[in-house]
Image (tube, rainbow, N blue to C red):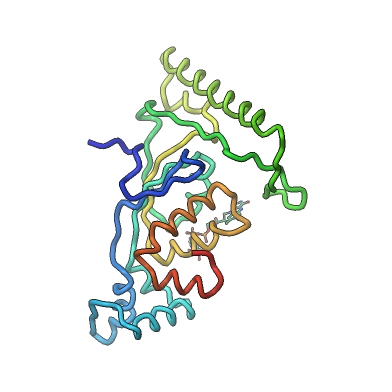
Amino acid sequence: MQHINVPPENHVKVLNGQGWVGLIDQLGSEISIVNAARVSFGKLKEKMAAADVKLLHYLLDNKHTSPMEHMAFTFSIHCPLFVRGQWHRHRTWSYNEISRRYTEIDMQMYVPPVIRKQAESDRQASVEWNSDTEAEMQGIIDAHNKASLEVYYNLLEKGVAREQARGVLPQNMMVTFWGTVDLNNLLHFLELRDHSHAQWEIREYAKAIKALIKPLIPNVAEYYKSKGQEW
Ligand SMILES: Cc1cc2nc3c(=O)[nH]c(=O)nc-3n(C[C@H](O)[C@H](O)[C@H](O)COP(=O)(O)OP(=O)(O)OC[C@H]3O[C@@H](n4cnc5c(N)ncnc54)[C@H](O)[C@@H]3O)c2cc1C
């Protein structure tokens, strides 16, 4: 049996190799979308033709979203706790996660590969820094990550329950979860999270998802590219 903390075969590494997102299952294809759109005519096709691409683009142009729900994906995601917090705001996904009430093995902590500065104009945002204190900042974060792990294991050793001891672990703790979503809601997620307003870390995951699904939805990707989006 494989451990869930191991990336699946089809995955993309993110955050300088500290995180990953993998595609573990898929339902339907672009042809399912156009077939769903034409269900009312009682006709089914097996291969995309030029007219189907045109229909697909028409659906996207006119926000005729329900046919997109007939294609779905399951991803396995390994990310810091704070990214998981942002991700789980997307209520249209279904989630399951490793329980830290159940296991204390394989704890990993995120150290940002690049340290950004607080933006002055936007209280939510950060800006490039290129500070010569970057290594020092990373060292402080790494030391705190390690110290909190030490406190955690110390508490476990003293007999404290995992469900309470985990309270001392920082937002940089890496978690692994599964997320299943249909294409319509995934496109919405990607629009919000591969965006300049989104935090760099979650944006990395959104870009990685695009790389994973692009071969499966080439005409949808092409549509967004034609609208100036990066795909
Ligand atoms: C850059 C950025 C900054 C953010 N900052 C903050 C912040 O400071 N604080 C904060 O709390 N959140 C913040 N968020 C989270 C944001 O408010 C949304 O919760 C998150 O992006 C999920 O979006 P969503 O609800 O559209 O997605 P989903 O939950 O996946 O929903 C998709 C769509 O389904 C429909 N839907 C889903 N649930 C309901 C419902 N109950 N009722 C009606 N329609 C529904 C809506 O049309 C919705 O757009 C931020 C998000 C981004 C991208």
Please say if 181 is above or below 228.
above
Where does residue 112 sit, x and y in percent of width and height?
57, 38
Q: Quadrant of residue 19?
A: top left
Where does residue 173 sit, x and y in percent of width and height?
49, 33
Q: Quadrant of residue 229?
A: bottom right
Where does residue 125 sit, x and y in percent of width and height?
68, 50
Where does residue 179 sit, x and y in percent of width and height?
38, 51
The furthest residue to the right: 120
- Camera-side residue of 71 and 110: 110
Figure quadrant, ligand 1: bottom right
Q: Quadrant of residue 30?
A: bottom left
- Left/right placement of residue 197 relative to residue 187 reads right
Q: Residue at x 29, y 55 (%)?
A: 25
Q: Residue at x 41, y 24 (%)?
A: 162
- Left/right placement of residue 214 relative to residue 173 reads left
Q: Residue at x 32, y 45 (%)?
A: 8
